[in-house]
Image (cartoon, helix red, strand yellow):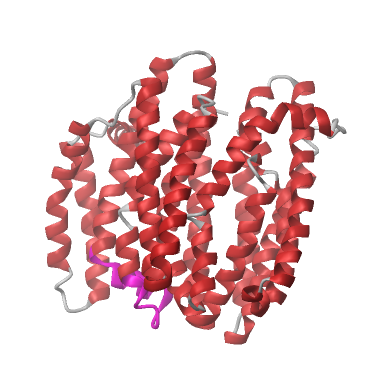
Amino acid sequence: MGLKKNIAYSSILTTSLYFFQFITYPYVSRVLGVTNIGICNFAQSVVLFASLFSTFGITTLGIREIAAAKGDRDRLDKTFSGIFQLNLLFTLGVIVLYVIAIETLPQLTPYRKLLYIGIFQILFNTLTMEWLFKGLEDFKYITMRTIVVRIAYVVSVFVFIRDKEDYGLYFIITVGLYALNGLVNSAYSHKLVHYSWQSIRVVLKKYSSPILFLGSQTLLQTLYTSFNVVYLGFVSNDDQVGYYTTATKVQNIILGLYTSFTLVMMPRISAMLAANDMADVKIMIRKSFSILYAFAFPTIILSEVFAPEIISIISGRGYEPAIPLLRIAMPLILVIGLEQILIVQLLMPLRADKKVFTNSLIGGIVGLVFNLLLVGRLQSLGSVLVWTFSEIAVFSSAYYFVWKLTGITIPLREVTRYIVSFLPLVAICCLISLIESRFYAFLLAIIITGVYTHLVLFRIVRNEIYVAFISRVKSKLSTK
């Protein structure tokens, strides 16, 4: 399948994923309230933290190894079988440790029922095997399956979640989403690969080194991502977890739209690097930078000015403390976007596992230190600051490693052109925010931001991807 179709399917996938969240989260946050949302999000963060151990390095390793083996059916079957066995082995070990933690940690006692339900999520997450389909670049299947399953999830939420006491049922529905994905994926995988038992000793010998580096990287990343929520829940209360997860969910929804492009590019750039085609790699990376700037700058400006309206639309009343958290988190769209280009599109395809590990080690140390220093005193605000400091540290180290390995740098002249071009939009949005009706002001600002962004990309900075897209649209319209 062509790169353009993969990007299109991945964009549809990510857009639909967050579209469904935009539908359900405002409803659920209003029905359950900030405390019960905090309870569910804390329990879910513990389950996801455990799931990260069960997929210790598997996701990235799987995508990379499956992509390398997809031209040889026998090699593909053996690669899939070995990686799946490792995943299952890790999962069973994690479930044992997870149950011990539930029974021994007093901080988890109030959430015991939800956490036991979460065992099904950990188990079925192993059967999801998303790494297989991404490695084979079967984005059409991933997209179609996700949309169907998500529709079932949305219908279930609106049918069964009626009042605050339904938070347990909401958690069950969320876990059911993972279970359904696992069952569907497991059934479909038989059409693509054939499972055969592989010697665990041989598999461990082959993959232990990359698993150690990639898994450790994932684990260290949790010290400033998902672990933030767990630690915040340990040292504060469910309300603070609710504020933090609401603010970061909004940011993650917006960032996810760009992430879909980054994930599609990874296997394609891996193939280019395998062919030693560095010239085309640099062209692709330059396009990635330009797409990020076109997306990030107007999004950040609009979100900073209208953060109160965004939180109100997403969650309703009672979530006002999440507004300053959102404003701190939004500039991370640019930082994390650059970080994804450097790590996912360059360091990982280059198999620079030690460099990726070092990035994560730096971020993990910064995250752990500032979690201990800030979160106990500043609570949800401290968690956002921990996330910010950690991402900046990871970006800085990744940029250094990419420069040393490839000579690729961020073109400062281009960044400056975008900043200067979008500065007037800040004043425009601030003026619009003075309109008495904040909702209509926000709606007007969205429209004007869209028009302004079009003019900047098409007329001023001449973003080559956007210009080419508009030209194709005009050409198609003129032929009709």
Q: Which residues are magenta?
A: 305-323
User: Percent position (x, y) of residue 356?
Assistant: 49, 35
Quarter occupied by residue 254? bottom left
- Relative side of 254 to 421, left or right: right
Q: Residue 392 versus residue 84: which sits nearer the camera?
A: 392
Main SS category, magenta section: helix
Q: Residue 80 versus residue 159: which sits nearer the camera?
A: 80
Residue at horizontal 67%, vertical 71%? Answer: 105
Depicted 476 relative to depicted 377: above or below:
above
Q: Is residue 322 magenta?
A: yes
Q: Residue furthest top?
A: 276
Q: Quadrant of the C terminus?
A: top left
Residue at horizontal 67%, vertical 77%? Answer: 109
Depicted 304 relative to depicted 32: above or below:
above
Residue at horizontal 73%, vertical 52%? Answer: 182
User: Percent position (x, y) of residue 233?
Assistant: 52, 72
User: Percent position (x, y) of residue 389?
Assistant: 35, 53
Depicted 93 relative to depicted 82: above or below:
below
- Relative side of 234 to 392, left or right: right
Is residue 265 at all visible to an observer of this figure? no
Depicted 39 relative to depicted 213: above or below:
below
